[in-house]
Image: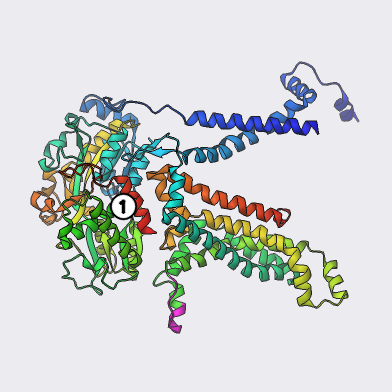
Amino acid sequence: MTSVSSDVEPPPRGGPGRRLSTFFFSHSRARLGGLLALPLGWMLVIYLGSLFLLLLASFWDTEPFTSDVVRNWNLDNYRRLFEEPVYRNVAFRTISMAVYVTVADAVLAFPLAYYMARVASPRSRNLLVVAVLTPLWASYLVKAYVWRTMLGEEGIINWLLAPFGLDGPGYTTAGLWLAFTYLWLPFMILPIYAGLERIPSSLLEASADLGGRSVRTFFKVTLPLAFPAVVAGSIFTFSLTLGDYILPGLIADEQFIGTVIYTDRGTNLPVAAAFAMVPIAVMVVYLWGARRLGAFESL
Amino acid sequence: MRGKRISLWVALGLLVGALSVVAAGCGGGDSESSSDWQVEGLGSTIDEIQANAKNEGQVNMVIWAGYADKSWADAFTQQTGCKVSTKDGASSDDMVDLMATGAYDGVSASGDATLRLIAKGDVAPVNFDLIPNYADVYEGLKGQSYNTVDGVGYGVPHGRGPNLMVWSNDAIPADNDTWAPIWPGTDYKGKLSIYDNQIFIADAALYLKATQPDLNITNPYELDDDQFNAAVDLLKQQRPNIGEYWDGATYAKQVTSFKSGEAVVGTTWPYQVNLMAAEKPPLNVTAKVPKEGTTGWSDTWMIASKAAHPNCMYLWMNYIISPEANAKVAEYFGEAPSNAKACDVTSNPNHCEDYHADDEAYWDNVYYWDTPQADCGDDRGEVCKTYEDWRTAWTEIKG
């Protein structure tokens, strides 16, 4: 009882903490400002600010000899991206890779996610979730180098294929596709799993009651309801493939957007900045499409 | 409704404000003249430098892989109290880029980086009076176009060496004496291991110099339109045969590629050849300079104009060209030392002879990495391809 009475006692006046608290109590806008200043400032200055700088730099020029950036406004960098076929080819190759990886991941992830969400017992479901998540916790670099080793001339892939008289893809674009597909697979499985789990069993039962066989139920009920989740997963697989430069540097024999930016960054920052706008633009379009397909409700 | 609109305006205001802060932060502030400064904090006598170095306690350098191995860097730390930290440069471009960050005290720069570093003002002139071992450096390395501008010396010669052709003896006879196997027309598709930098265009030009005399190539770094296009064409034809590129940060990749058979022929540094020989069992490869000649390097230790540890850096520049350390690094990397006295203390007594340390005639046929400039340096005038052209072409060649 005594403790309750001490709580309702008027607070001692004059303490600086108290005064601050009183101030914030009566000034709701300042309260909101104080709460959001740090995260919002971080977001605006560090996050959007650096993107804004990137955009600015893409309109600048370099001094031909020293490659120092000269703040001389022009559109030449973008013109180069359009006029020099190499940039078009690299952008096209990278976007195609992102599409292939996304499709492969969706094809691989869907059955597994379906099994996890709809078929597996709770116990094996938990085991599967752990099995999917564990590779995510391993270091990216370890996985990248593991693939480099596996794809090598004397790696396990060639060893497995040798009895059939076949040769693995080696360090080529096809090998890169395999490695990317492996690397981003969990990012596809988890959203689909979550999406499938959210479908109420009553809908499937209703379909069955109305005479829908399992195949028909799958295509008419499950797949349409899970599709936004697939799109949500594809945002990860697509954008991660689009931006990566380490794996292409380790495995591919061709250039990708990331590797070109990486080499240009030191010697021609404005061109690198302009080229960096390409994946950003692609992602803006992609996210807009994903939103229309309802993917954001599934994230 | 009204509240919502106001907060939208506030958010917009914040955004504009934040962006203008960022924009203001990136404008101006780098207009310092690069002519006559001294490195701040540097002692004016050797004794003073040694005393100051004890306080600095460390030196951070951008180096070519293998230039500051523990086997001689530790002795330097013991003598001077300066701990040695290094970062391997992937290429000359990477080194220039790293030095621009201002985080390093010095760099072992090749001739295709030195002039850019000087022009950018990132490195300072060197007072050779404070580097006693400089007196013993071969005269052929002093006052060269790549380390001296308008009579002002910008660094201490480290040593020099050739880029080599390397091949697996299973694929190509050990007595091969031509670069032809790396160029189109031979069948090593997917088995080529090539240095990943535009400076490699010079290697193509050098091969054309020997095989297509009508192009009149005199210097592989001074290429006019026709010569340059011929070299780029050659490289584009070579491109499908390349299994993998390597650079100064991924040189170890090349050793494993030759070990596993992914690569059978390519270009290399003597350093990787030493690594291949140190494998157990040693790789069955041959490395040499074929008859067409080769490109190479003559490296220079330079001090950053804003070095945080200038005294340690001066001591290092003196140490690395001391006979003992210079002999060690020259043998470890596989290059010719810059200090004549190093030849007396190499563990292989024939090292200097094998690597032509004082054979200037030999070096006449090794085209040190250089920065391509519009001015051809001869009566053709300003029609040569610039460094920027080389860079663009290299991105194009890689496709």
Start and end of the magenta stretch? A160-169
Q: How many marks?
A: 1
Give x and y (percent) for residue A213.
80, 78
| Residue at the outermost bottom position | A164
Residue B9 in the image, given as x and y percentages of width and height: 70, 31
* In the rendered image, the vertical position of residue A266 relative to residue A242, given as above or below: above
Which residue matches tag 1? B198
Compared with A93, A46 (above or below) is: above
Q: Hey, what amino acid is under mark 1?
A: Gln
State left or right for residue B232 relative to residue A215.
left
Describe residue A258's horizontal placement relative to residue B150 as left or right. Answer: right
Residue pictured at 18% horizontal, 41% vertical: B322
Q: Quadrant of residue A122?
A: bottom right
Q: Quick one: A179 or B23, which is closer to the camera? A: B23
Q: Of residues A212 and A113, which is closer to you in this image?
A: A212
Question: Going 11% across and 44% down the picture, which residue do you hit?
Answer: B341
Name the one closer to the observer, B241 or B228.
B228
Which quadrant: the N terminus of chain B? Answer: top right
- Residue projecting furthest to the right: A1
Q: Classify the position of the C terminus of chain B by image quarter.
A: bottom left
Vertical side of B203 occupied by B51: above or below: above
Q: Residues within 10 Å of mark 1 (few under 14, many from 20)?
A: many
SS at badge 1: helix
Q: Residue A177: within the magenta?
A: no
Image spot of residue A296 (x, y percent): 70, 53
| Residue A48 appears in the rendering | yes
